[in-house]
Amino acid sequence: MSDDHVGGNDWEPAESPGFLLWNLENHWQREQRRVLAPFELTAVQFLLLSGLTDVGAEAGMSQIELARRCRTDPMMTSQVVRLLSKEGLIERIRQVRDKRAFNLRLSEDGRALQRRAASAVRAVETQFFAALGADLPAFSDALRFLAGERPRRRVQAVSRST
């Protein structure tokens, strides 16, 4: 790929990395909606349920901790948690130290639903990204890097000849 796609004079919008990412994101979101529809879950609801899967049943997790863990907006997280709680998928446990605050945990129904939905999401994710083959780890690292995170694997050092 040449630098022309990023800043050259013959820039084509359809070749822009931003456009390609936006297009891919739209396609991925359609696939998520399709696979989550039978479970009557949105992608955000599934994400928040999944964020609570390994939380201890006794302690739970605060709403702000869940938002940080899932990288979601705290206000949106609050609204979605309220809905999931009304649907009986999340339980709210009053905190011991601050009686005004609650910790969250999955209910048995929430855990069962998340487990079934996760299986379907994993299957569609495997199919969706299958074309990347052995390049999938590098693709994932590139996404992390662009999001300002450190890649999970070490980059192979290139030796320099002097």
Image: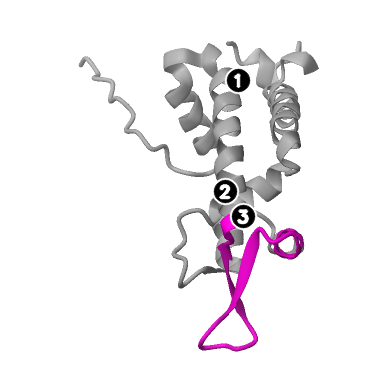
User: How far apart are labels 2 and 3 at the CA level?
Assistant: 5 Å
The answer to whether 40 appears left or right of 4 in the picture is right
The answer to whether 160 appears left or right of 21 in the picture is left
Residue 109 disc label: 3
- Amino acid bearing label 3: Asp
On the image, the x and y values in percent for residue 123 come to 56, 25
Image vertical order of residue 154 relative to residue 106, above or below: above
Image vertical order of residue 43 relative to residue 96, above or below: above
- Asked if the magenta segment contains residue 113, the reply would be no
User: How far apart are labels 1 and 2 at the CA level?
Assistant: 24 Å
Residue 96 disc label: none
Q: Which of 65/2 is in front? A: 65
On the image, the x and y values in percent for residue 25 come to 70, 29
Quarter that holds the C terminus: top left
Mark 2 Cα shell of 10 Å, populated few (<14), some (14-19), many (≥20): few
Which dot, 1 or 2, sits closer to the camera?
A: 2
| Among the two numbered marks 1 and 2 on one chain, the one whose residue lies closer to the N terminus | 2
Magenta-drawn segment? 80-108
Q: Residue at x 74, y 43 (%)?
A: 42
Image vertical order of residue 2 relative to residue 63, above or below: above
- Amino acid bearing label 2: Ala
User: How far apart are labels 1 and 3 at the CA level?
Assistant: 28 Å
| Among the two numbered marks 1 and 3 on one chain, the one whose residue lies closer to the N terminus | 3
Q: Which residue is mark 1?
A: 128
Task: Tell me whether the residue at label 2 lies in contact with that at label 3, contact meaning CB atoms closer than 8 angstroms.
Answer: yes
On the image, the x and y values in percent for residue 9 come to 75, 14
Q: Residue at x 72, y 20 (%)?
A: 16
Q: Which residue is mark 2?
A: 112
